[in-house]
Amino acid sequence: MSERRRYCFELHVKPERMDEYKRRHAAVWPEMLRALRDTGWHNYSLFMRPDGLLIGYVESDDLTAAQAAMALTDVNARWQAEMGEFFVDLDVAPDEGFVLLEEVFNLEDQLAAADRA
């Protein structure tokens, strides 16, 4: 069994679309929620800065495989088609266009290493 990894990514929501983006994410379609869970997306959260910078956090055994599995679902195709118009300078589906960020610190990992030392 593989170990779940942490992933963080960024996108940028158009300032004029931020309120609508928040409304849509306050009530994500139940079918979409279940598809994310079933394809390996865990502890998934989105955070948005007042200027529209969107930071996503997700845990997965394999994010590439989770993205590929989501790409095979009808609900994801519908959701990505609707969400694409919300982002700045994005010419692919949002779940294909986010920029992964490098993790440079994790408290639990460092505490575990310190406790082993």
Image (tube, helix red, strand yellow):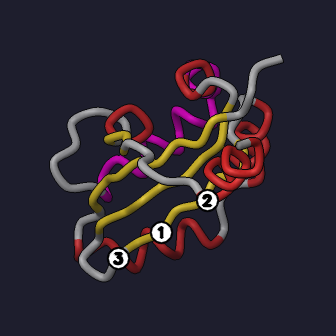
In the image, which is nearer the foreground, mark 2 or mark 1?
A: 2
Pick the residue in front: 97 or 78: 97
Label 1, label 3: how many angstroms apart (C-alpha)? Answer: 7 Å
Label 2, label 1: how many angstroms apart (C-alpha)? Answer: 20 Å
Which residue is at 76% across, 20% downward? 2
**Which residue is farthest right?**
1
Determine if the magenta segment contains residue 111: no
Tell me the amino acid under the disc marked 1.
Phe
Report the magenta residues as a range: 68-86
Contact? badges 2 and 1 (CB < 8 Å)? no
The numbered dot on residue 107 is 2
Which residue is at 84% across, 17% downward? 1
Neighbours of disc 1 within 10 Å: few (<14), some (14-19), many (20+): few
Tell me the amino acid under the disc marked 3.
Arg
Determine if the magenta segment contains residue 71: yes
Quadrant of res 17: bottom left
Q: Is residue 3 left or right of residue 25?
A: right
Pick the residue in front: 13 or 81: 13
Q: Is residue 36 left or right of residue 57?
A: right
Badge 2 element: helix
Badge 1 element: strand
Q: Badge 1 is on which residue? A: 47
Which residue is at 77% across, 40% downward? 37
In the depicted structure, whether residue 40 falls above or below residue 15 = above
Tell me the amino acid under the disc marked 2.
Leu
The numbered dot on residue 49 is 3
